[in-house]
């Protein structure tokens, strides 16, 4: 199940509609997903921008979050986007 993890591997939120511009290499790849808006309550994503994205097959990629936007059609869901890089 796709997830947003903190730098230490702890789950912050379950992701839905995860889209990754594969392949993820050292030059990076864009990603976008949706998550429950309340999952980010208490997190300042403008200061804490470095996370890990786990895709649907369990691969983990360091992630830089560039934007979190509540969806106008459903305020309980937010769109998250940014850049992934290959680990190692």
Image (spheres, rainbow, N blue to C red):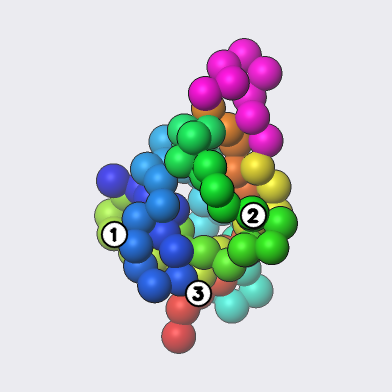
Tell me the mark number nearer the camera, choosing from 2 and 3. Answer: 2
Range of magenta residues: 69-76
Residue lying farthest top? 73
Give the vertical position of 50 relative to 77 (above or below).
below
Tell me which numbered mark, 1 or 2, is placed earlier along the sequence. Answer: 2
Tell me which numbered mark, 3 or 1, is placed earlier along the sequence. Answer: 1
> Mark 1 and mark 2: span between their CA atoms?
23 Å
Residue lying farthest bottom? 88
Q: Secondary structure at mark 2?
A: loop
Q: Which mark is residue 58?
A: 1
Q: Is residue 6 visible?
A: yes
Image quadrant assignment for residue 57: bottom left
Q: Residue at x 52, y 23 (%)?
A: 76
Q: Residue 67 at what x, y percent from top left?
A: 69, 47
Q: Residue 58 at what x, y percent from top left?
A: 29, 59
Work out whether residue 51 or residue 45 is closer to the camera in this orientation and state it: 45
Q: Secondary structure at mark 1?
A: loop
Residue at the spot of label 3: 86
Residue at the spot of label 2: 45
């Amino acid at each position: 199940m796709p997830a947003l993890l903190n730098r230490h591997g702890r789950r912050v939120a379950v992701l839905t509609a995860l889209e990754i511009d594969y392949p993820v290499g050292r030059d990076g790849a864009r990603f976008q997903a949706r998550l429950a808006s309340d999952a980010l309550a208490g997190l300042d994503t403008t200061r804490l921008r470095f996370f890990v994205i786990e895709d649907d097959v369990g691969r983990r990629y360091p992630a830089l979050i560039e934007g979190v936007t509540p969806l106008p059609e459903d305020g309980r869901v937010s769109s998250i986007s940014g850049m992934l890089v290959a680990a190692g």
